[in-house]
Image: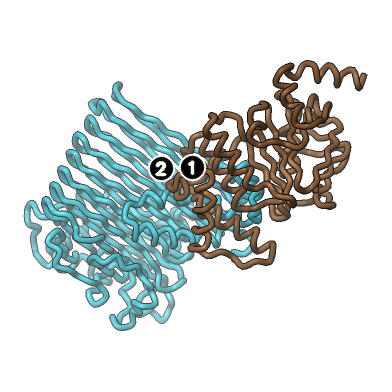
Amino acid sequence: MSDRSLQDDAARAHYVATFASLGRGDGGGWLGSLRQEAIERFAELGFPSRRLEEWRYTNVAPIAKLAFIPASGTGDPGALDMEALALPDFGGTRLVFVDGLFAEHASRLSDDPALEFQSLAQSSSQADRVQGSSLAHYGTLVEAKDDGFAALNTAFATDGAVLTLTRGRALAGPLQIVFISSGGPAAPADGENQPGASFPRVLIVAEPGSEGVIVQDHISLAAGTSLSCAVSEIVLEEDASLKMILMQRESDATYHIARQRVRQQRNSRFSLHSLNLGGAILRNELDVVLADEGAACELDGLYLGRDRQLVDNHTLVDHAMPRCQSRQLYKGILADRSRGVFRGRVIVRPNAQHTAAEQQNRNLLLSRGAEVDTKPQLEIYADDVKCNHGSSIGQLDEEALFFLRSRGLDESVARALLTTGFAAQITESIGSESIRDWATAVVGARLETLFNPGESP
Amino acid sequence: MLEIKDLHANAGDTPILKGVNLHIRPGEVHAIMGPNGSGKSTLANLIAGRPGFEKTRGTILYQGKDLEDMAPEIRAREGIFVAFQYPVEIPGVKNNYFLKASVNAMRVHRGESELDAMDFLAVCKEKMALVEMPQDLMGRSINEGFSGGEKKRNEILQMLLLEPKLCILDETDSGLDIDAMRLVSKGVNSLRSPDRALLVITHYQRLLDYIVPDFIHVMSEGRIVKSGGKELALELEDKGYGWIEQEGGSATP
């Protein structure tokens, strides 16, 4: 283990030095001091080791040993070929971030009265946070002390989306947030091609009675190695309703480590479709706190792995108050020698009577070399509750396969159809038709590369 | 069209069929009756090529070709269709999408052009009307949440769309009420033609009031122990299977 701690020391030193050389703690203000605290925290924590229960199945040493430096967009805004990205158009506001930095020229703002948007860079120019503003929540749901990645994001994020869904209003159309990873720093230091990192940051505050659909889409410009270290903080006030579709489809060489925390107030509704299309390591840590009575969340996840990818989902649903509901369905499809990890915890606190919680994890292994570690976990401290959970790991249903073949379909076509069907159970519950069709097509295209293990590189 | 000689077969490790002989010509409708466990469904599954059913002796020739080495999808494309006793539910795979893929697999095999969505819909609507299949079942996952009767009608709809040469109904009447049985029979009868053969496997005589066979075979303990015309069904209805089994038993001491 000693060589690893040496490596870890080197990693800490690298980011502390990078932070200093970029002057990320300078300029003062509340954000500057938050960043300064965060890098100090990172220096203490370093990257999480597998000795931590939360990281038992995911070894981040490959990330620790690469000295990433913050990528700074494409430099020239005109260099971003939006046409080539073929982004879907849902007709609403579109916010584009390149390497975590707001790209206004590539965005489409609107005067939807249901939405207030400020980039973090704009809002951080104010020396103090206005009490009661959305920004007051920044760094309070996900804190730098939580773990090394949360600290790293907080230290290096200089921009991001700060969104308020205004009281009692519904968004005119789906809000689209696109995070584009350029794959490298604009100017390689020392002429060396160091891999670039971006630090996507999102803060959403849904005010009482507000309603909206948000599509958060992560894509890559280049195929090279990069790190996306993302943090999202989401607050749903009383009676707010938010539907999120999270699409993670960066390059195969991307390390994507995301932390999302949601806090729900009375009678609020949150739904998430988390579509994880792969990456060298793709990790999502999602916590939902049902903080007041009558709150409900529905979490649907689909993770795909190929080659030697690792896709890891950790969820935690905290039933802190009575009469809340949660439902989770995560499905994994793993090909080649890829690995999936699902760890889902549901905690029902002692006073959280009349809780209804369901959690299911289903995995489909397409090859002998693929693996899944699944661990659904219920911790129930109240007695009048309705909870169930389950998990499965398996291959395609032989009966169904035979049936399709008996109707004339080739075995490979039948396998593809069944696998697509397995995935479709997640995408078909997306409410908006245009988003559902888009998500189904993107997932379908990726699935095609999983069907024939021999053909992928 | 179908020639079965001295067929012995296992379901899993259990010997079920113990010397079946059966000859079906184009245009004929045959029925196989018999008590539970006599081997009727094993025969259907063996012809369809279902994994887990293994021939140990004898031959099954279909249009002069041995089925032994033919994959299930090739058998289907060559015109064999089995309406299964327990239609499988396939969550996530839409009925209409599957049916179109299936129809087009057949068309490609026959050297015809694939149907596009519009043409398929037109053909499909016509066949659906025949078995009074509710429109909304098309957009749903295959058999998911279908009633017993709807599942069986879905099987018949597939048969109508795929236009097979040899149609085998494996206890399609089980669990159907009289109205559903009428619909299913109407669909099946619409397929009767001089170049198509039907094999109806059933436990009860009542289906044969609607689909009138040319020949009836009685199966018992893995063999066909008696064959006759459609009047045999009435005799079975009167006397049950007991007398046949006794007769069969005495014929092969």
| Contact (Cβ within 8 Å) of mark 1 with mark 2 | yes
Q: Nearer the viewer, residue A196 or A457?
A: A457
> Is A149 left, or right, of B2 in this rendering?
left
- Height in image: A293 above or below A156? above
A49 to A439, vertically: above or below: above
Residue B37 shows up from this direction? no
On the image, the x and y values in percent for residue B156 come to 59, 44
Q: Residue at x 65, y 64 (%)?
A: B108
Chain drawn cyan, letter? A
Tell me how the rendering is colored: by chain
Point out the tag, 1 or 2, that comes first from the N-terminus.
Answer: 2
Residue assigned mark 1:
A362
Q: Colour of chain B?
A: brown
Residue B206 seen in the current view: yes
Left or right relative to B166: residue A287:
left
Q: Position of residue B70 (x, y in %)?
A: 77, 51
Type of amino acid at the residue the image marks with label 2? Leu
Residue at point 29% right, 42% down? A297
Q: Label 1: how many residues lie within 10 Å, few (<14), some (14-19) or many (20+)?
A: some
Q: In this view, which residue lies farthest toward the front?
A: B231
Q: Which residue is mark 2?
A: A329
